[in-house]
Amino acid sequence: MHTGAFRGTEVPGWFQPTFAVIAVMAALPIQAQTLNRNLVVNGGAENGAAVQAIGDPQVGQVPGWTVTGPFSVGTYDVSEFPSSTDYGPTDRGAKLFYGGSGTDHSYATQLIDLSGASSEIDGGKVKFYFSGYIGSGGAVPANIQQAFLKAEFLNGSGVTLLTAVAPGPKFEEDDGVSNMMLREITGFLPPNIRTVRVTVDLATADSGSYNTLAADNISLVLATESLYGVNLLVNGDAETNPDQIDFANDKPVAGWNVHSQITVGTWGDYNFPSATDPGPPDRGQYFFICWGDRAADNRAYQFVDISAAKQMIDSGQVSYKLSGWFGSGQDGDTDSPDNADLQVAFYDASGNGLPGLQVGPVTAQDRNGQIGMFQRSGSGTVPVGARLARIDLNFNRLTQDVTINTNAYADSLSFVLTNATPPSIGGIISLGDFGALPNFTSGSLIEIYGSNLATSRRKWSGADFNGSNAPTSLDGTSVTVNNKSAFVAFISPEQVNVQVPDGVGTDSVPVVVTTAAGSSNVFTVKAMPTAAGMLAPAAFKVNGKHYVAAFVGPDYQSTFALPAGAISGVPSRPARPNEEIVIYGVGFGPVTPDTPAGVLPSGATTLTTPLQATIGGAPATATYHGLSGFIGIYQVQLVVPAIADNDAAPLNFTLGGVPGAQTLYIAVKQQ
């Protein structure tokens, strides 16, 4: 047996959408990456020319952008541009966008192709993070709040389906000094989005002959996340970018639109509450503070676009929970009246306000002289018509002594939506890359499709296992097959992957998914003694022939038995007669020694059902057939028979006399 291919001790390696182990997917060509990176070209203004004085004529082209009006590029630390040490991006480069010379409307746009994530978008899986910095050189002009960032998400016909706007800061939010303020909005994309038009709008000059408004670090990132059952706040625990702490020169707090006096503190530092004072049980190192002595606009806020859930919201089926930890007090100042609270406000598509909720504050009387933080939470139903949520963290300065900084803290802030609709099953198949069979057997790995199947999106991890035993529930989603608990490996609202438990029988059996919202419809599937499928990803279909993902030497992990160069970027060569190949499969039935479903295999096993295979019509001897080191994944090692060269030799197998349902091929060549 090839120990290079057999994984006897690894954590299970298959997950959504099917099975991304054994280098198969890693070996496929890397497509244009749409997810988990900044899609904006030249978002930091670093490419191309820049002017050296704020009144100079604009630069010509701004790479990546279509410019209208005097929109231009400037340089930090010269003329009236912001300084590289001013409040603003910690990772700023040497340049920034600015309004330019003249009084015409100044803006720039960029059209970005999102089709590389079309399947994820159409499946309702994609969250967007749109952000940038807006500011000015010198004294802040009154028109700063006329600037904004806008993302218009379009379908394939160019129709706008969603518009997300991050408005510019208010004049008072940046203390009237030269600052670059983070502005951000997040949300979820509706189906059929294919492009996005990003706009940086720097308005018009409010006086004089040039526009001093500026922008930098424009970013749009897409990620596969869930709308329900997870904290929708970015950096709700203050732990992101903790290296930004610098009380002498505060930096923006990641994820939040903040007043420039709001930053983060460290538990136990500077007479702040310590790790042993009351506070969140899962506290990290940092929490939110307001370092200034002003009473006005001491707030941080986030916008979350929730319009992707409009149908559920308008039917009254979406609830929310708002939660946070709040407090005050320092050594020698346990009776400070300052406090903090968290509010959510909802808005309809026209921007009209809808009812929301406030949690907190925790007053000095509530604390009863204790230093630390205490939890406050509340919940409600998202109001009908709501399309946007704004969550505000407010620091309420009640101290009258202007020489004393605001003494209030917050941590572990969360805003969670819950879909109250029970799950619904629409279909079940065995793993898609292993034949997508309509039947299964005990121990099979299956994919369950439907809606509202989970409130989060993740696969199992080592932390979910109890020793070698796989979990039967992830984040509140569980599955039964013939009234027996299945082992849950991946969850998302539209797909759940499980291993079928032992002892489900060989008849029509019911499958049910259960979440906190209730149980699904009963979906009936025919269970079989075996339901074997071999690994053959869709990408392995070449010139009308579907090739099995058969590994060849020398490592049996990276090179496939395909015609040389059959799939661009995939190492391949034909298998040689009398050479061993390694194939992976599912649904091959019981093994000896017995390995129960839901338990990590710990060594070599053997199928109890007879396996026979042919390649090119000639018998292929199996030198190993049993479990691999992954739960539910079998490993078959065959010796290629001495047949003539054939770039598409049929590979057939029977298990207990039952032919495999797939039509598969392998390349064989004398060498």
Image: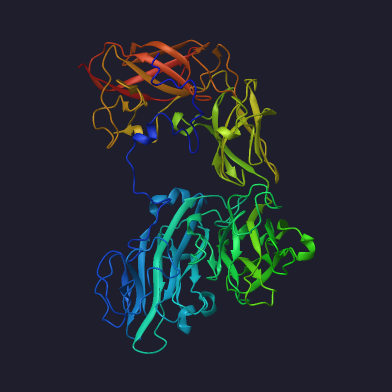
Say left or right for 3 vs 57.
Answer: right
Could you say where residue 652 lies in the image, as x and y percent from the top left?
39, 18
Could you say where residue 200 lies in the image, as x and y percent from the top left?
40, 71
Which quadrant of the figure has residue 617?
Answer: top left
Rendered view: 415 above or below 602: below
Q: Is residue 104 visible?
A: no
Which quadrant of the figure has residue 89?
Answer: bottom left
Rendered view: 294 above or below 500: below
Instruction: Kindly identify the residue that appears in the image at 34 percent across and 27 percent down.
Output: 547
Quadrant in the picture for the N terminus: top left
Q: Which is more toward the observer, 612 or 66?
A: 66
Say left or right for 196 vs 407.
Answer: left
Q: Which is more toward the observer, 620 or 54?
A: 54
What is the tally of numbered marks visible in this picture?
0
Instruction: Kindly identify the residue that appears in the image at 38 percent across and 80 percent down.
Output: 212
Could you say where residue 564 lies in the image, as x and y percent from the top left?
23, 29
Q: Which is more toward the observer, 588 or 593?
A: 593
Say left or right for 54 vs 272.
Answer: left
Could you say where residue 113 lies in the image, as x and y percent from the top left?
36, 58
Q: Kindly give the residue lying farthest to the left in the view shown.
A: 671
Q: Is residue 305 visible?
A: yes
